[in-house]
Structure formats: structure tokens, C-alpha cells
Image: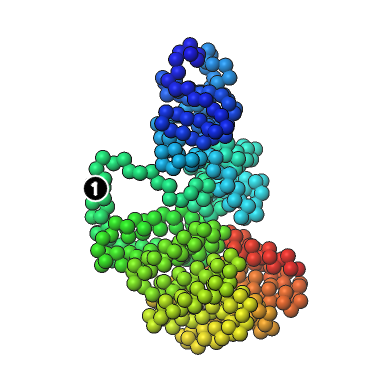
């Protein structure tokens, strides 16, 4: 008997975890006990009851006279009960959300090289810019510490802010493993399936064009603002396209949707790479490749393979990246447009330079120049993600030459700087970094430092983790 009445549920806490009915959750908590009272409240020692429930402090109920000494009641809704039970039911040994926040939030913050104090500052600035109400600085410092230590779960209000600031998905922020989905409890799953198949069958070419327009809008915003602020929009867009393809049955319906998905997934992958979410980038490229094959679109397949080669390069595998990009050229074959062909050769030149293959680099640059169509037009009408004209190729040439220490690099890069579209913010940051690298190769340290300062300002505007990492690597060479 506890508090004068029989408990409905008694739970003993120990190093191995705690159990509740048919559920078992692995928690590391002090020894003690809790019970579920008739009015659907859980009680526990104050030092661990809140952690156990995974609820924020606001959910605590004030101590009532006559309650068990040392016990604090905590409100738990049916949703909370289901959520905690699901941890055991749907994946044995899976720790509940609060315990996983440590790796997710801390990893995302460290990827940006932000201190906890800097994160608090950014939250306040974001709230001010968007007229949002957030806690005081002192409270936010406590929140950030507790979020990272698994002592407090991140509410949706703050999760939305953090996703935008850090450019991560909700699963990455919470430290959850993607793909853990609760099984359906629908009484008749066939009704739901048929309903979704019927909806997918009604996806017209007009709707597919709308999907493509949304991808184009996200691409434009990414070019000017960076990827971090678009994480929720991009995640939702991909989910809609994947859903449409999953429940489309006949090839004539599937192919247009798959084509739209291939383009969107490749853009999402590049954005993930830019914010340092390497695994997400790799998975999105795989999704883009599968969608391109489904759509029977060799150009989209070649483009996804070529961009995926950059992930290998960044991971320290440039030799494998060279092989992949050459495979991409073969996959595209005769179906490729001249502009995409030139783009693939230019990408090959850059990757060959990173792999220490100067002769291959020069040959690929020559081939890119030969295949590039004449004129100022940069957009490929058959591959809207491709921007390449003489100015862009001059910049790319300078970048590759800088990587192999060629004296021509500086001249090519300054020509590209004069011609670059000012709306290409991330590309401008990359160009400034290229110039810094070229000046370093010539021992011109003052000029290199000046270019790095400007590159850092541009990279901060877009929130590019990838660009900042490169800038820091170049700065260390000064």
C-alpha cells in the first residue's frame, strides 16, 4: 500500500531498466518505484520521474498535501503512454526519445562548430526575426544542456527552430534511427491501401509539373539562402513524391512521378551534403538513382551518380570517386545533352585533381570545353539542375587547376569572379575559397587571407558546413 491505497502498477527501477505490464524500456535511472494512480497520473521520485516520462518540467503537477513523501506526480496522456510503450513493442532495446537527443543535437551543433552559448544566441536571434516567443537566455542555457544530456525532450516548438538553424531533419535532431515505423493497427488495411492507390492514379501530368515547379523553387531558394533553412520544406516535398510513387501502380503513372522524384532527391542530397549530413546525402542519392532508373531517365541517373562521387571525395576516397563519375558518363551514354556532358567532364576534372591525377584533370577539362555549347545561356532545358556556360566552366577550370597547383588558376578564377551571378551565394563562397587556395599555392598569403575572410562571410550567410570546413582547412595552412 502506498499513500493509503493499493497501486494499480508498481515499477522497480534498476540499472537494467524498468518494466510496465508487457512493455520494457531500457533506462539508466536510480533505484526507486512509481505507481499509476486511478486518476491516470504517474508518480516517482522527483530526481528521476520527469526523466522517466520524457516530459518537460511544465508537465509536473504540484505536490498535493497527503501525497507520498518524496514522490512527484507527472501528467501522462494516453499519447505519452503509447509512445513509451512503442519503444519496446516496435523495436526491442530501443531507448526512448529523450535518451537519444544527446547524439543528435550535440552532433548537429558540433558540425557547425557552435558552442552551447552560440546556439542559445542563434535561437534568440531566430525568434526575434520571426516574432516568436522563447524562454529567457538563462532558461535556454538549461534547456540546451538538458536536451543534449537526455534529461528533457525537445518540444515541437523548439524542434522547428532547431531544424531550421542546424539544417537537420527531425530524426537527426532527436537522434532517432530512420525507418522505425509503428505497424498499422487499422481494422481493414485494404480500404486504406485502395484509397491511396486511387489517389495516386489521379496524379496527372499537371500535378507532376507542379512537383517539378516546387523543386525548382526550392533550388532557387537554396542557391540564394542555403540549405539549412529549407530542411522542413525539402523533407515534406520528398515525402509527398515518395508517397505518390509508392502507391502509383501502372508504368504510365509511375514514370513521370519517378522523374520528378529523381530531380528532387538529387537536390535534397546536395543540400544534405552542404549541411554536413553525410549519411542523409548518400541515402538521397541512392533514392535519386533508383527513381531515375524507374523513370528510364539516363540523364538523371548520370547526374545523381556524378554528384554522389563528391560524397566519396569528401570522405577521403577520391580514387573511387573517379571511377564512379566515369561510370556516370557511361550510364548517360548517347542520351546525354551536350551541356550535361560538359558538366560531367568538368566534374571529372575536379575529382581527378583531388585524386592527384593532373594529366587526367587536363584531359577532362579539354573535353568539357569541346562539348560545351556556345553562347551565354547556362541552363540545360533537359536537366534543369545543370547550370553551365563559359563563365561557370572558367571558374571550374580555375578550381581544378588550383588543386593541382597550376599557375593558370589565379587568372581563370578572377575572370570567373567578374562574371559570376551574384545570386549564386554558395558558388561565390566556393570561388573565393578556390582563389585562396590558388594564392596559397603561390605563397601569396595576404591575398589568400583576404579571400578567406570574404568566403567565410558568404558561407555564414548560407549556413554551409561543407564550405566552412574547407575554409578552416585552408586557414590552417596560413
Horizontal side of 287 relative to 65 (left or right) equals left
Q: What residue is drawn where x is 61% and y is 85%?
A: 359
Residue that label 1 marks: 190
Q: Nearer the viewer, residue 16 or 243?
A: 16
Q: Position of residue 128 (x, y in %)?
A: 57, 47
Horizontal side of 258 relative to 318 (left or right) equals left
In the depicted structure, whether residue 459 falls above or below residue 9: below
Q: Nearer the viewer, residue 301 or 379?
A: 301
In the depicted structure, whether residue 406 falls above or below residue 318: below
How many numbered tags mark residues here?
1
Q: What residue is drawn where x is 64% and y is 62%?
A: 469
Q: What is the basis of the colouring in this image?
A: rainbow
Q: Position of residue 448 (x, y in %)?
A: 72, 72
Q: What residue is drawn where x is 71% and y is 66%?
A: 475
Q: What residue is drawn where x is 39% and y is 83%?
A: 334
Horizontal side of 193 relative to 423 (left or right) equals left
Look at the image and tell me whether residue 48 can be seen.
no
Name the quadrant containing residue 234: bottom left
Look at the image and tell me whether residue 63 can be seen.
yes
User: What is the secondary structure assignment of the residue under circle 1?
Assistant: helix
Q: Position of residue 450 (x, y in %)?
A: 72, 69
Q: Residues within 10 Å of mark 1 (few under 14, many from 20)?
A: few
Which residue extends farthest top? 4
Q: Position of residue 1 (x, y in %)?
A: 48, 13
Which quadrant of the rendered structure holds the C terminus? bottom right
In the depicted structure, whether residue 89 falls above or below residue 454: above
Name the quadrant containing residue 409: bottom right
In the depicted structure, whether residue 398 falls above or below residue 79: below
Q: Nearer the viewer, residue 476 or 393?
A: 476
Amino acid at each position: 500500500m502506498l499513500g493509503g491505497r493499493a497501486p494499480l502498477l508498481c515499477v522497480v527501477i534498476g540499472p537494467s531498466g524498468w518494466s510496465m505490464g508487457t512493455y520494457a524500456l531500457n533506462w539508466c535511472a536510480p533505484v526507486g518505484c512509481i505507481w499509476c494512480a486511478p486518476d491516470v497520473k504517474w508518480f516517482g521520485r522527483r530526481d528521476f520521474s520527469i526523466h522517466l516520462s520524457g516530459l518537460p518540467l511544465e508537465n509536473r503537477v504540484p505536490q498535493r498535501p497527503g501525497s507520498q513523501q518524496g514522490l512527484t506526480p507527472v501528467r501522462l496522456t494516453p499519447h505519452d503512454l503509447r509512445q513509451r510503450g512503442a519503444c519496446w513493442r516496435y523495436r526491442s532495446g530501443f531507448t526512448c526519445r529523450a535518451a537519444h537527443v544527446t547524439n543528435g543535437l550535440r552532433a548537429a551543433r558540433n558540425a557547425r562548430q557552435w558552442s552551447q552559448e552560440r546556439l542559445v544566441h542563434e535561437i534568440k536571434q531566430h525568434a526575434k526575426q520571426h516574432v516568436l516567443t522563447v524562454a529567457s537566455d538563462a532558461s535556454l542555457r538549461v534547456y540546451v544542456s538538458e536536451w543534449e544530456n537526455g534529461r528533457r525532450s525537445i518540444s515541437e516548438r523548439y524542434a522547428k527552430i532547431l531544424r531550421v538553424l542546424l539544417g537537420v531533419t527531425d530524426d537527426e535532431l532527436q537522434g532517432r534511427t530512420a525507418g522505425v515505423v509503428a505497424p498499422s493497427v487499422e481494422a481493414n488495411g485494404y480500404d486504406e491501401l485502395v484509397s491511396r492507390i486511387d489517389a495516386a492514379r489521379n496524379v496527372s501530368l499537371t500535378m507532376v509539373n507542379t512537383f517539378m515547379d516546387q523543386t525548382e523553387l526550392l533550388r532557387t531558394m537554396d542557391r540564394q539562402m542555403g540549405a539549412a533553412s529549407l530542411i522542413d520544406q525539402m523533407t515534406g516535398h520528398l515525402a509527398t513524391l515518395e508517397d505518390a510513387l509508392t502507391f502509383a501502380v501502372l508504368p504510365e503513372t509511375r514514370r513521370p512521378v519517378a522523374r520528378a522524384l529523381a530531380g528532387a532527391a538529387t537536390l535534397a542530397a546536395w543540400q544534405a551534403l552542404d549541411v554536413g549530413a553525410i549519411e542523409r546525402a548518400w541515402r538521397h542519392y541512392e533514392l535519386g538513382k533508383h527513381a531515375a532508373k524507374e523513370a528510364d531517365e539516363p540523364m538523371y541517373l548520370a547526374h545523381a551518380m556524378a554528384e554522389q562521387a563528391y560524397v566519396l571525395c569528401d570522405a577521403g576516397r577520391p580514387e573511387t570517386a573517379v571511377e564512379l563519375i566515369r561510370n556516370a558518363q557511361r550510364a548517360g551514354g548517347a542520351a546525354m545533352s551536350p551541356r550535361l556532358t560538359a558538366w560531367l567532364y568538368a566534374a571529372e576534372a575536379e575529382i581527378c585533381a583531388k585524386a592527384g591525377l593532373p594529366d587526367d584533370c587536363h584531359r577532362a577539362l579539354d573535353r568539357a570545353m569541346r562539348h560545351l555549347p556556345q553562347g551565354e545561356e547556362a541552363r540545360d532545358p533537359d536537366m534543369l539542375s545543370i547550370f553551365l556556360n563559359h563563365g561557370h566552366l572558367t571558374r571550374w577550370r580555375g578550381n581544378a587547376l588550383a588543386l593541382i597547383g597550376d599557375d593558370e588558376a589565379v587568372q581563370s578564377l578572377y575572370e570567373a569572379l567578374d562574371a559570376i551571378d551574384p545570386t549564386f551565394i554558395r558558388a561565390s563562397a566556393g570561388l573565393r575559397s578556390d582563389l585562396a587556395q590558388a594564392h596559397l599555392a603561390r605563397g601569396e598569403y595576404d591575398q589568400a587571407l583576404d579571400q578567406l575572410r570574404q568566403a567565410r562571410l558568404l558561407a555564414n550567410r548560407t549556413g554551409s558546413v561543407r564550405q566552412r570546413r574547407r575554409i578552416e582547412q585552408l586557414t590552417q595552412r596560413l
